[in-house]
Image: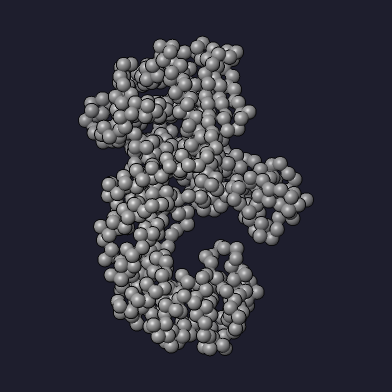
Amino acid sequence: MNKYRTQYYDFGDLAIPNELMKCEEVLNDFGKWNSYKSIDQIIELYNVKRYIDSGIRLQKWTDEIYSVYQERAKTILGVIGRFFSTVDLSEYAGLYKGTDVLYKEIFWDIFAETKQYKKFDDASFEKMVFETGAPLRCILGQKETVARFGAVIRKYILEDVRNTEFLVSSFLEKREKPKQNYFLPKELTDSDKEILVQKYIDLPQPNMNYLELIAQEDNPDKLRLSDRTKFNAYKRLEKMRSEFLTSHRAIETTMGVSFRPMDGTGEIRYDISEPLKPLIEYDTVWLENNLDYATILQNFYWFEVVDLKSRCNLVSNESDLGIFDTVFGLHGRKEYATGQSFEIKNSFALLQIRGYYEFLKRHGVELESVYQWFFEVYLKEEFGIDGYVYDETSSNAKFGERNKLIVSKIDHVLKQFSLYCADLRIDREYLEFSSQQTNFSTVPSLVENKYAYCNDVKLKNEMYYLFSSQSMLTYLERLGKGYDSLFEMISKEKVYYKDFNEIQQTRIEYLLQRGAIIKCADGIILINKERLEILIQIYKKDFLCIAYENTESEPLNTLISQKELRLEKTLFSVPEQKYFNYLLNKAEFSNGLDLRNKYAHSTNSLDERTQYQDYLRLLLVMAIIIIKINEEFILKSKHEQQEKGGPV
């Protein structure tokens, strides 16, 4: 018999129909199964059994034929058992070495499922496993094998310091798809792991990606590392990066923000004549003519810190992550996704706030005084909100001291807002009594059903097919070119249903059923604009601001009634909550900047330039908080006017 090379793939893989045709050939070879002599043939049978057991079948298989195949598949484990009954203990290592490279991992699946391990004692298993040199992923995936030979497997792990990379990848790295469960022997202690990882750090050339994960990640259940070991990895990583930059030529990129006199109109000028040196220019003439506190705060919209719906533009959105951000390199299991787009917009934001802060200082304006005015004067005069307090900071205070104060103020202003949401007043006595720290995710909103989030895989798939550059719907042979998304293609080209191949048409049918697109009588595909105006916001921003949408929109109400959208009532959207957690603490993200905790516990850097940059970040955070709180009172006032029937 020829080897058909049947491979097992998870449900949904496009290769499955081809593999099922191979299975058909193997199943039709039923009469020869007991004469199979090759381990590859035996593994192939095992793959066939997995397909039949999963219920996946070719459309051309009649119920009668499929029933026959099911009965034949039931005999496969018996065939495998008889094959291994003729294999001597001393032959297992050679059998594994002779296994096709694509089947080596499945060899260990069969070894465990057919309980071949029961034939071995510790000595014979140790001889066999060391002789095979099998990758750890093959062995540690088998729970019973690991439990039976824990001491041997511990020795096998500790034998090679490079096994650290497997442990780090398995237990510290984030994976988009669920990872296979790996089992560590109970004989492998935390001290064993610590020593192995430290040996890896001390290698002449450890991989910098793994060093980064060791330094920032933790997995208390599987790979608990001391702060000392993590610090050693961090210092080694710093040294290697410095050496790399010294010995390799790098492409220099710079970005600039300029505040200079222009024509006084407030025009923003973008200079991208040199793509690697983008520049944004702001008009100081206009700024000097608009130094009132209200306009100073309004200018954060001008700087595009938020959009016109008060959504923070600085957060990391899933749609902004390119293939280089997600596929290349290693990413920690609790890491905040900081892709290229995120780094660029946050770098620009820091340059903007630095330039504006220094411009205001030159004109005698302290930005925190503007913040104090918002809370203590503006809210009272504009909305009748009494009792808000924002402590003044001395203009002579050093940045380290300012940072300690402003992280406390962030908590203070959010507590005051939470109290107002609960009681429609700020009870100072209760505020002083309560000592609970504010969590960004639990700060409430004055607006019912403020945000909507995708709550259904069907909706997520719909948006993926429409907007993702990774969808299979971005290229048509007739057009001879690809687009960033199906949405872009349909917006720019006349596209017909018949242009899509058979596999693509299954996705197009899905979008037609969902109502995202429309097929005209002549076969032209059009966009359902009303539905897509909603979906593109959710895809791009990861949420929808209900208050700014047409509440009579049929697509919106349908998504809500079918619970494909989840409604929440919080001050900050989930992406904003995550962004603040990334900046201010490490409770959620391993790579968080931890600014609040560092300054609250005096573990911050003593470098003044670093403290200044941290202060600028914290000024940005407070500006966003102010914008979000102001939005709340505006929306609340608008709603009250609507209920009274008056003008909005």
Residue 227 seen by the camera: yes
Q: Is residue 306 above or below residue 167?
A: above
The residue lying furthest to the left in this view is: 433
Figure colour scheme: one colour
Question: Along the horizontal axis of the image, is 213 left or right of 99?
Answer: left
Q: Where is residue 290 in the image (x, y as percent from the top left)?
A: 50, 13
Residue pictured at 60% horizontal, 47% vertical: 469
Front position in the image: 235 or 259: 235
Front position in the image: 613 or 412: 613
Q: Is residue 78 above or below residue 602?
A: below
Q: In which quarter of the image is residue 498?
A: bottom right
Front position in the image: 559 or 454: 454
Q: Quadrant of residue 96?
A: bottom left
Q: Position of residue 594 (x, y in %)?
A: 34, 37
Residue pictured at 69% horizontal, 42% vertical: 491
Q: In this view, does 21 lie above or below 268?
A: below
Q: Position of residue 87 (x, y in %)?
A: 42, 85
